[in-house]
Image (cartoon, grey):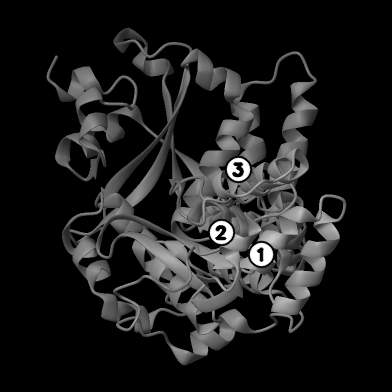
């Protein structure tokens, strides 16, 4: 009954704002059967809130005050309430989510002022909050790179100790740019906070994987630049490829609007890596051209790749990622058939105990021990940007002496480089 709501007040918190309404006025919306939406527009202006916020308030009001039980509403009003609950016409999925930053490490996170200025430089003033967040994410992906030694040491040892120290973040800049996932996460979070964008981090600093979720305008977005070291956005952004680490997650969020903002910002940043993208596209075009021919040998394909990768402007893991990904584009059938294997292992830096990753390609018609003479190995020369022949004998010797080794224990026990297991196991 409407009279039950006379002089009654309804209190609710919306994104850290304490609000108070006359219950009778909120209830009155449901008696405007032929004018629900116009009433929503009028009252949202009167209350100085958005229509989405008013929809959120009405849903809570209906449940808290048991409106459907205590009031005689029309079928139209009941259907309208159900539509409000389903977010049919409004989007309430972002409201009261990530209303403040949740990060125990934020105050400890100190960044170099020049580096911050470098990241924010050229950011357009008319960007929305969402576009500023996207810009920051992509610029970081273009600038930072995954630490190859951390990768080669399998996230253990001295590299792990170095990266676990949060004070290291102050030394990060566009030149000293090697990071790991939780460092990227912390840097990105700090930069979001500086722009008034709230976020919630997951994972522990200095141990295991970490990512974050932020809220900008009406969008709740998860961000993970290192979904994979070999194929994540730290690499993808450097060749202007499709990015996969930013995902709109509020269920009724405007996907089209999010995509438009993303494409707009990415277009503003793509000029930086046009040379790398050009080489990648040239290789893809070359692959399409040779794919139309009946038979092209593995050697001929490798010659095409070698001629192009000399000019890539990438370092460390990004260089390995580039070659690894282009190999998979050129040799899908051979990889599927098991006669073309790409292995990423570690190697000792000469005169030191430090490990560094290296990429080994193995191919041949058969990897049986009796066919060793017909098995070929290539190693990526990180200085010359070329794939160079390494003999089977030398590879066995390096693996046996510990100069080369597998990064993961699983790869060690399986000896994923073909035709090496029997020699190394003494069989």
How far apart are the two marked residues, 1 and 2, measured between alpha carbons? 8 Å
Horizontal placement of 261 versus 225: left or right? right
Dot 3 or dot 1, earlier in sequence: 1
> Badge 2, how many Cα within 10 Å: few under 14, some, many 20+?
some
The residue that appears at 76% across and 51% down in the rendered structure is 256
Residue 219 visible in rendering: no
In this view, the mark in front (3 or 1):
1
Horizontal placement of 86 versus 402: left or right? right
> Where's residue 144, x and y in %?
49, 67
Q: Secondary structure at mark 2?
A: helix
* In the depicted structure, whether residue 378 falls above or below residue 381: above
> Badge 1, how many Cα within 10 Å: few under 14, some, many 20+?
many
Q: Secondary structure at mark 1?
A: helix
The residue that appears at 43% across and 49% down in the rendered structure is 229
Which of the numbered marks, if any, corresponds to residue 104?
none
In this view, the mark in front (2 or 3):
2
| Total number of numbered discs in the rendering | 3
> Where's residue 88, x and y in %?
72, 45
Q: List the single residue furthest toward the left.
A: 426
Q: Secondary structure at mark 3?
A: helix
> Where's residue 89, x and y in %?
75, 50
Q: Which residue is mark 3?
A: 306
Dot 1 or dot 2, earlier in sequence: 1
Q: Which residue is mark 2?
A: 61
Q: Are marks 1 and 2 in contact (CB under 8 Å)?
A: yes
> In the rendered image, which quarter is residue 306 located in?
top right
Horizontal placement of 401 versus 219: left or right? left
Indicate the quadrant containing the N terminus: top left, top right, bottom left or bottom right: bottom right
Q: Which residue is mark 1?
A: 26
* In the depicted structure, whether residue 239 falls above or below residue 302: below
């Amino acid at each position: 009954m409407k009279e039950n709501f006379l002089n009654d007040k309804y209190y609710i918190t919306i994104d850290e704002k304490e609000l108070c309404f006359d219950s009778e006025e909120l209830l009155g919306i449901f008696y405007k059967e032929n004018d629900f939406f116009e009433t929503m527009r009028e009252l949202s202006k009167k209350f100085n809130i958005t229509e989405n916020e008013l929809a959120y308030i009405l849903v809570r009001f209906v449940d808290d005050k048991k409106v459907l039980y205590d009031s005689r509403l029309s079928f139209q009003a009941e259907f309208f309430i159900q539509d409000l609950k389903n977010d049919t016409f409004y989007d309430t999925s972002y409201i009261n989510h990530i209303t403040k930053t949740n990060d125990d490490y934020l105050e400890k996170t100190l960044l170099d002022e020049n580096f911050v200025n470098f990241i924010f430089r050229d950011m357009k003033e008319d960007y929305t909050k969402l576009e500023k967040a996207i810009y920051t994410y992509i610029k970081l992906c273009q600038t930072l790179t995954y630490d190859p030694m951390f990768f080669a040491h399998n996230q253990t040892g001295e590299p792990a100790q170095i990266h676990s120290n949060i004070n290291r973040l102050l030394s990060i800049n566009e030149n000293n740019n090697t990071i790991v996932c939780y460092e990227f996460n912390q840097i990105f979070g700090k930069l979001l906070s500086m722009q008034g964008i709230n976020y919630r981090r997951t994972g522990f600093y200095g141990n295991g994987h970490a990512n974050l979720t932020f809220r900008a305008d009406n969008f709740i977005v998860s961000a993970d630049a290192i979904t994979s070291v070999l194929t994540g956005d730290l690499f993808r952004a450097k060749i202007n490829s499709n990015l996969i680490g930013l995902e709109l997650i509020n269920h009724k969020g405007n996907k089209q609007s999010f995509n438009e903002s993303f494409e707009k910002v990415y277009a503003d940043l793509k000029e930086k890596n046009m040379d790398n993208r050009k080489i990648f596209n040239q290789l893809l075009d070359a692959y399409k051209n040779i794919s139309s021919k009946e038979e092209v040998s593995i050697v001929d394909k490798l010659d095409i790749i070698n001629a192009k990768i000399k000019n890539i402007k990438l370092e460390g893991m990004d260089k390995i990622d580039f070659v690894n990904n282009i190999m998979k584009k050129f040799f899908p059938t051979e990889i599927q058939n098991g006669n073309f294997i790409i292995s990423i292992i570690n190697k000792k830096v000469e005169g030191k105990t430090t490990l560094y990753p290296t990429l080994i390609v193995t191919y041949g018609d058969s990897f049986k021990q009796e066919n060793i003479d017909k098995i070929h190995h290539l190693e990526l020369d990180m200085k010359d940007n070329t794939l160079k022949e390494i003999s089977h004998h030398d590879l066995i010797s390096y693996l046996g002496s510990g100069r080369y080794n597998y990064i993961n224990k699983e790869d060690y026990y399986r000896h994923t480089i073909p035709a090496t297991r029997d020699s190394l196991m003494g069989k």
